[in-house]
Each structure stands twice: as structure tokens, then as C-alpha cells.
Image (spheres, grey):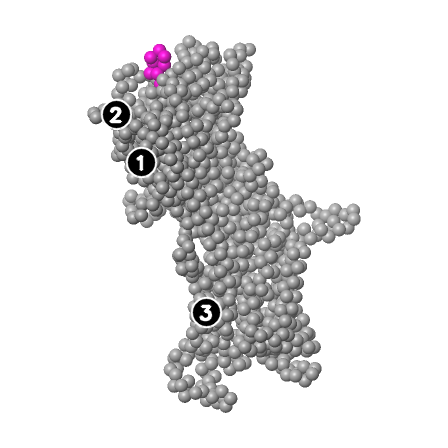
Amino acid sequence: MDCSLLRTLINRYYTFWNFVPKNLFEQFRRIANFYFLIIFLVQLIIDTPTSPVTSGLPLFFVITVTAIKQGYEDWLRHKADNAMNQYSVHVIQHGKLVRKQSKNLKVGDVVLVKEDEAFPCDLILLSTSREDGTCYVTTASLDGESSHKTYHAVQDTKSFRHEQEMDTLYATIECEQPQPDLYKFVGRINIYRGSDDTVARPLGSENLLLRGATLKNTEKVFGVAIYTGMETKMALNYQAKSQKRSAVEKSMNAYLIVYLCILIGKALIDTVLKYVWQSESSQDEPWYNQKTDSERQRNLFLRAFTDFLAFMVLFNYIIPVSMYVTVEMQKFLGSYFITWDEEMIDESTGEGPLVNTSDLNEELGQVEYIFTDKTGTLTENNMEFIECCIEGHIYVPHVICNGQILHDCMGIDMIDSSPGPGGKEREDLFFRALCLCHTVQVKEEDHVDGEKKSSQSGRSSVYISSSPDEVALVEGIQRLGYTFLRLKDNYMEICNRENDIERFELLQVLTFDSVRRRMSVIVKSTTGDILLFCKGADSSIFPRVREGKVDQIRARVERNAVEGLRTLCVAYKRFTSQEFEAANTLLQTAQLALQDREKKLAEAYEQIEQDLILLGATAVEDRLQEKAADTIEALQKAGIKVWVLTGDKMETASATCYACKLFRSNTQLLELTTKKIEEQTLHDVLFDLSKTVLRHRDSMTRDNFSGFSMDFQDYGLIIDGAALSLIMKPREDGRSTNYREVFLEICRNCSAVLCCRMAPLQKAQIVKLIKTSRERPITLAVGDGANDVSMILEAHVGIGIVGKEGRQAARNSDYAIPKFKHLKKMLLVHGHYYYIRIAELVQYFFYKNVCFIFPQFLYQFFCGFSQQPLYDTAYLTLYNISFTSLPILLYSLIEQHVSMDVLKRDPSLYRDIAKNAMLRWRLFIYWTFLGLFDAVVFFFGSYFLFDNATVTSNGQMLGNWTFGTLVFTVLVFTVTLKLALDTHYWTWINHFVIWGSLIFYIIFSLLWGGIIWPFLNYQRMYYVFMQMLSSGPAWLGILLLVTVSLLPDVLKKVLCRQLWPTTTERIQKLFQQKSAINAVPGAEGPLLEESTAADR
């Protein structure tokens, strides 16, 4: 294998040499393109009634436009690849710095990276410009987290700060094979100081600088290349998103198959009738067209097959190839309406919505289930320290207690009685624990990148952390008298209430992970005391506590959780020297392991974090986002079910759901949690819940305007991650009854569902479970963090929120919005419009092609099935490309059947288009029969007109091309005026395009038939159009036939609006009445805000 390829990052899909064959292969994998290619080849091979140009030109147009678009996108990827692979980096060679292109880096090269530069490959951090060997890094381009993270140099190499010193370093590194997990790395460095002096140190993710991350607030670092090119973790994380297809596209393909069957049927009928017609010799060989001997001797079946193919070519225009181009253009251009929407721009940040794919625009109007994250999506992810509880005593910042104000803080309120002498020691231990047990860094400047908070006490310290919770806790404790100053040379310094500086040596850090849900530090005080401080979720702390006021603290934690606060518990333990040595040896053994390091570390942490003494708990508030409650209420009125999927505890998440109106006061909560399953078996709990909801199923009817009716029982389900795991597991007894189906049945009958304690993979499992259920509902997932990416990719539509948890969700999503509140307009307005417009576009395209081709089919009955075309080649080619394309494209971009304000004010209008209502088979059949009716009117109307008026005023006879031109003229005017009748929102652009298209057709016909074109071998249309217009009956016939063709559709619309109006049509009527009354001076019209429930 070429090693240079491994060192080069490749995102491109094509190369200069393979673009044409590879792109053509990709395009002809589409059924419609492949079908037209076959038709084009048939026209080239056999004698067909139409020119190959009629199929080849539209196909060439489609293929060319798509190839240009895809080629441009790949050219941008080429530019990005070159920018990443060819920028210069500094490498140490023989004690000197030399410059290399990043694509030439090899494993083992020692690289110098300066502040604000991106790392060119995955590096093991050897040393930094800081004395303590740390550096700050932002990984926004990898995991979306813009906050600073701290990385540590290898202890034995952090003193090598210059090129000459680095050149004297001799070491080997052993590490795992490249793998995509950004947060896991297992390795070992062996440093050789002499012939027998070798030191082995563990390497973990805290030593690994990832390609794409950026160095911040550190002058420079030295690192050794460990993974390069396509073996870097960033490259291994490039995930090809699964191709998402909208419901409209699936309907288009189904309709295409139906029309293909109609096409084959028409070709078969005409082929059979042709040979029935020619069964008499006089009709088979008329005197003016006698066959040659070779034609008489040809095989009958071969002749029949050739004729069948010729009829297929003649009728192939019933399949609208240009529809795909129009749909692509409509989606691409229509997507800009979201990005241009000023109401969806966040004023505080200036950021607006993003459209990462335009293929799913119409799917925004079909959403039935929304799965949303809680933290950062429904809430602000802006943490504020509220209170702490120490052995039952409550401390609230900014509150003065008994007139006593502690030094350097706003105040403390001890709601319970003051602690005794023993309690005072526990209180100090609690504050020290929060000052020491964290990953917060201190920056002594006013401004830094990433998560930052300035102290309120006058100090200039700025706290930096990857977690907003940790910043809030350190700040909160600062207001209560204890200030974290810095971490330097492995010593942590804090300032206590008396303004004395306390120093603690940091011995070990037991890092936080989502499985343990806690973190610990082991520190040594100046007095020699060795302490372990641990903080984490109550579910992970309480089982490991041997003493402390557990009941009082548990009660306070539960109370705060019910109020929607985020809680953490704090505990500690003391080590003797022997106990610490044993624990330290256990940790070092696990840290040096190359195999199963994570498992061994988890086991070591589990052994060490036992027999803790509970100190207290903290409460931090994450405020609800602006208008989150109004948005959820509007979505529920629109008939959309909203599920909240979160990793938080049940009580906190439940309180948030009440605050945002997901659960209401009359909602009966059903619990499917581990606690319930411990009391009963899973089977019993599921079937009890099933009986409860099914008992009221018949009464659970939705009111058309306000969601679930308040007169009937409303259910909400709460499920946790452990219970979901049991439900998703296959039955051990092998019985056919599936817990999943029972669970789904319960969910269908609940107005809202809360899934708490969910792992990221479980979020995706929930989405997939609903997505693949028998109703096949359209799902949407919305989140703001890296842990939401899995469900965003799994859902039909993924929406990322540009939040404080980073941008990975936004980058992996189909759409990105600044705030959750913008989801309301995106679905109820933009989604509604997108679906209405593209549904009309699809139905209209099939309709106008039926109108176009069915007269050609009828014409064969009058020309002896001779495959004589009814229309001229120019008309066949330009009908879909020029004459009728622009009006429907413009309609599909700007049509508004009701105004934006009405859609926002009345969410129930969203239900009118639910479940692909505009593309159901009933409507498809109606449009098809309407096209057939119009085609019959065009053809036979023109036929009877010619039958009675075959001579013009100057005595000339009207021929077959004049007849075809008359039919085509009526056709173009009818289908264009049909679209005009369907248009509700008129602008000058509509008028220009609709009437301009008709004028263009007339001018083209006059020029095409009025000039002798030198490049044509024959010109059968010469003077035909002018001859037709010179006939008075032709003018009358055009007006009459257009009117008759449009009349049934107009009558149908009038009757349906009067007898069976939809909610949208009622709103349109009210709006028209209001406009009419407001036109009268001094009159006041009915307000659209008034509920139309009485009409419904």
C-alpha cells in the first residue's frame, strides 16, 4: 500500500480521471435516468416515430445539471483536502526546526505547534511552554465543545522545552491500533536514560492531542506524531450519513411505477390493435405503401417487438424526467427561505438557521414525533449555583443570616440551626471538596475563549472548564467564602474564609465518566493528611456511603430534583499512608496496562471509592429556554407527540417537563422505572400499564384545536434507561409475545413520554423503535450536544441546536437552529409551505404529462396505429423544458395558501397535511382522471372542429400538423391556466412567469414556423401555426376547449369548499371575509384569532 495515502486526509469522492465514469454510474443508478437512457438507445437502434433528440436532449440536460452540481461540491472538497494536507508544520530534525507539509509527516516525527495553531496529526504531548507541563486545547472541530480542555505532558519529558533538548530524548511508544473513539487512548512510553535506566509511563487520552483540535492560551508545545493521515481519530470519525429519503420522494417513485405500467399497457394495446388492423391485406399494404420482399419475410414476433418498442418511445413522455430536475431546484432554492428568515436569528449571538441538506424540506411538514434533549435544548445550559446542603444545613449565597456576613462573600443563609463544632469541620471539608474536586482551570485575564465566568468578589480570576456545572459550583463556593486559586506544579491552592492560602498536593485524579457518574481526587494537605474527595450523582454516591446524615441530605436532594434543579452529592474518606500506597499501586498497575485498561481502571476506582462519609449536596439551576413551553404547546396542538430523552434523573426531568407544559396538571403519570420493576416483574408492570391506558383509549380523542381534550384522561409515561434495556432485550422464554409491542401500545396512548437516565445509544434505540413501528411515523430529533448525534442521525429529520455543548449536533444534523423556540416556525410555517408546494408540484407534473401524451395515444386510432406523432419534435422536446416548467417552479417556491401569521396562530392547520395527505392515492387518481378528461376534451374537441371546418378562408386544407398544433395550443393554455386557478398568493413575479410562458409559446411557434431554418433538413411546421391562427373556428375552439377543460375542476373545488371544507379552507374563507369588510371604511372584520371550533 502507498504509505503516502495513509498520511493524506481524503474527503473527496471523485478524482480528475474517474469523475465522468463514476458520476455517470451514480446517476444512472436512478431508475428514471436509466429508463430514459434505454429509450434513447432504442431510438438510436430502431426506426422510431420520433427523433432521438426528443429523449436525448432532456436526459442530457438532467445529467449535465446534476454532474455540474456534484462536480462543484467535490471540487470544494478537493480544495479543503489540499488546504489540510499542504499547510506547513515545524518538525525537529537533528536539533533544528525544519518545515514540512503536513501530508509528509511520519509516525515518530517530533512536531512544534504554536498558540492558535491546529494540530496536524494525533500527537503525544511531550512538553509545553508551561512549567507544569499542561496546555489548553479546544476541540470544537472534533466534538463540538468550544470550552477549554486541559492536557498533560508526560512527567519525565515535560522539562524538554527546546529543540536541542528534545533531540537528546530517546524513547519508544507502545499503543493500540487506530480506532475512532475520541475519548479513549491506551499506550505506554518507555524512556531510556542510560544503558539500564528505563522508565515506563502510562499514556492516556489526557496525553493525546487530536488532529483538528486547536492550541489555546499556551505559547507552544512539542509532541510526537502517533497517528497520521487517514489513521487519525478525526479521519476515522468521518461517518457517511445514511441516505435519508422523504415521504414525498417515496410517493414519487410509487407513482412513477404506476405510470410505467400505464405506459407499457398503452404500448401493448396499440401493438395488438395494429396487427388486428393489419390482418386485412388491403390495410396491411395499401397501394401507396407496399412492403419490400425483405419486410414481408421478417419474423412476425420480431416485428411485433420492434413495434412495441416504437410505441414505448412514442408514449415515453408520460414519465416526467424533468420533474426530478424541477424538484431538485425547488428544494435547493427553497432552502434559502429558512436561512433568510430574520425571525429565526438569535439576537444575542447573531446566529441564524443553517440548512445542511435540502432533500428533506417537505419532511418538516410531516413530522408526527419529536424527540428532544433536555439540557441545552429545552433549558439554557447556563448554570447558576442555587444552594448547598451540608449535613442538613442549607446554605444560600447572597442571603444574610443573623446579620453575619462572612469575609469576602455576599452572605450565607443557614436555614436550619447552626452546626456544632463537629459540623464546622464537616462544613470546611465540604467547601474544600468543591474547591479541589473538579477539572476547572484559572486564567488570570479578562477574556479567554471557551466557557468562562468572572468572579463576583472582585478577584480577576476567570474559571475555564469543559463543564458549565463545574464553573457554577466553583463560583458558588467562592461566594460562600472559599476560592480556588490555581493548580501549579501538581499543587492546588485555595483561599479560605480567613483569607489564608491552603496548599494541597494532587496525588491522583479518578476521572468522571458517564457510567460511574462521579469523579474523585486524592490530595495531601500540608499537615500530611491524605484525603479522597468524591462528587457525583446521588445514585452513584449513596450506595458507597457508610456514614453521614443520609436521610436528611436525600430528602433535600429529592426536593431540589422535584423543583427541576441539578443535584450532586459530595463525600470524602481519609487514607492512612499504607492505604494510599495500596490504592496508588492499584491505580498505577491499571494505568500501565495495555490490554483492558479501562476495565481495570473501573475496577480500581470501584475498590477505592468505597466506605465514604457523606458531607452534603449541591443544587444548580439550568433555566428553561425562552418560549420553550409555548413551542411545545403549539407542537402538541399541531398533533405532534413530543418525547423528552435525557440523561438526568427522573425527578429533575419530570419537573422540567411540567415547567415546559409537556406534562399538565391533569396528566396522570405512569411510571415504567427500575424501582417499579423491582417491586413487580417487567411483565406485570407492562400489562398493568397497558390495561390502564387501553381502558380509556376510546375516550382519548383529540380536540381539533387544543390537542387532547380536557374532559378526558391525559396520560404521560416516564421510563428510565434500565427499564428500556429490559424491554429491548429478547424474551428469554422464547414466547411470541413481544414486550416492545406492548410498550409501543402504551406510548401510542400517552400524550407525552419522558425517557430519563438515557445513554446516547439508547436515545437512538428509542427513535428507531418508533420509526420502524407499524405506522411508520415521521420522526424528528433535536439536540445540542455530542451525545445527541446518534438520535439526530437515526431520525427521519435531525435538527441541531447551536448551544453551549458545542456544534457537533449542528454539524451532523440536517438543519440547525439557534434556539428551541425556532422549531415552531420551522415546522408549522416553513414545513407546512414546503410540503404543500412540493406536493402540488408532483401531482401537477403527472397531470400535465397525462394531458400531453394521452391525445397521442388516441391519435393512433385515427392513423392506423402507424406510430405517427401528433406533435412536432420541437414541441415534444420543449414542452417540459420550456413551455410549462417555470410557472410550476415559481409556484412551488412562493405559493402561500394561507398567511404565515395564520399558520403560527393556528397550529391545528398542520393536521390538514399530516400523513402525506396531499399525495394520497385518492388524490393521485383524481389528478390522473382529470388529466385523462382534459386530454379527451383537447383531442375530440379539436377533431370535431376539424371535421366541420377543414378549409381556411383562403381555401387551404388543414393538415395533420395543424391539427396537432391546435391540440398542443389548447394543452399549453389549459395546464398553465389550471396552475393560475390554483394560485392563492399572487405577486408580479407570478404574473410575469405565467403570462410570460404563454407569450413565449406563441412567439416561439411563430418563429419556428415562420422562418426557413437552414440547419433543418426538412421543415414540416413551416407556416403551420400562422395557418391555424388564420382560421376563425380555431380561435373559438381554443377558447371553448380551454373553458370546458377547466370547468370540472372549478366545480369540484366550489362544491367541496361549500359541503366538505377543510380547516385550511375555512381559514381562507374567514381571511377573505375579513379583507372584504376591512376594505369598507370604518368597518371591522372578524378576527382570525377567534376559534373556528364551532364551524368544525
- What amino acid is found at the position of numbered circle 3 in the picture? Phe
Q: Secondary structure at mark 2?
A: loop
- What amino acid is found at the position of numbered circle 2 in the picture? Arg
Query: In this view of the protein, which residue sits in the foreground, 937 or 605?
Result: 605
Q: Quadrant of residue 930?
A: bottom right
**Residue on which disc 2 sits:** 193
Q: Are marks 3 and 1 in contact (CB under 8 Å)?
A: no
Residue occupying the point 49% across, 30% down? 449
1057 w.r.t. 969: above or below: above
**Residue on which disc 3 sits:** 40
C-alpha span from label 3 to label 1: 58 Å
959 w.r.t. 584: above or below: below
**Residue on which disc 1 sits:** 108
528 within the magenta span: yes
38 w.r.t. 105: above or below: below
C-alpha span from label 2 to label 1: 18 Å
Q: Report the magenta residues as a range.
A: 523-530
Q: Position of residue 1026 (x, y in %)?
A: 66, 75
Q: Position of residue 837 (x, y in %)?
A: 57, 55
